[in-house]
Amino acid sequence: MVFAAALVTDRLDGELARRRDLVTDFGKIADPIADKALTGAAFIGLSGLGELPWWVTILVLAREFGITALRFAVIRYGVLPASRGGKVKTALQGLALGLYILPMSDAWEPVQVTAMAFAVAVTLITGLDYIVRAVQLRRSAKPGVS
């Protein structure tokens, strides 16, 4: 319930900020970090309990930390905000994690595994997209800026 409430309030916060035109560069950086902390804790907890293979958690967290580091590496050239794909990734991770957290019968395992497979695939694909966007941002920087 706490995980679901955190996801819902995060979504409402984002909607409210956009609706009231309160989007800031700080928010563009801080919100994705908060998302990563929330989902990362759930991934680690599920793997620690033996509910989710550690390789899934390691792969997802490596992507998340890598993209966060990349965002900070290019911040002098501009902010790399969350993409639409990144938002889909967060939603899919939330759905997949929620399916693993809910107490369901073993009959739901194929649904859980499929949802997690989609979440991991989109996590990796959007990671590549962020790398491309960071390279484009860096290349579009004014000459003399480094």
Image (spheres, rainbow, N blue to C red):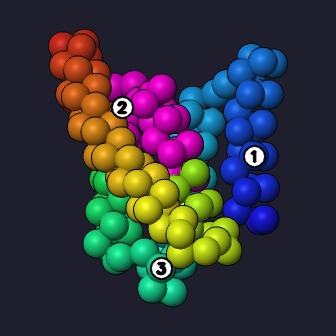
Secondary structure at numbered mark 2: loop
In the image, residue 119 lies at what x, y percent?
41, 49
Q: Residue at x 69, y 50 (%)?
A: 7
Mark 2 = which residue?
76
Span of residues in magenta: 70-94
Q: Nearer the viewer, mark 2 or mark 3?
A: 3
Mark 3 = which residue?
51
Main SS, magenta residues: helix
Whether residue 36 is visible, yes or no, is no
Mark 1 = which residue?
8
The answer to which image quadrant residue 12 occupies is: top right
Q: Is residue 61 magenta?
A: no
Q: CA distance from mark 3 to mark 1?
A: 24 Å
Question: Disc 2 or 3, which lies upstream in sequence?
Answer: 3
In the image, residue 131 lies at what x, y percent?
24, 35
Secondary structure at numbered mark 3: loop
Question: Disc 2 or 1, which lies upstream in sequence?
Answer: 1
The answer to which image quadrant residue 24 occupies is: top right
Location of residue 132 with respect to 89 vertically, above or below: above
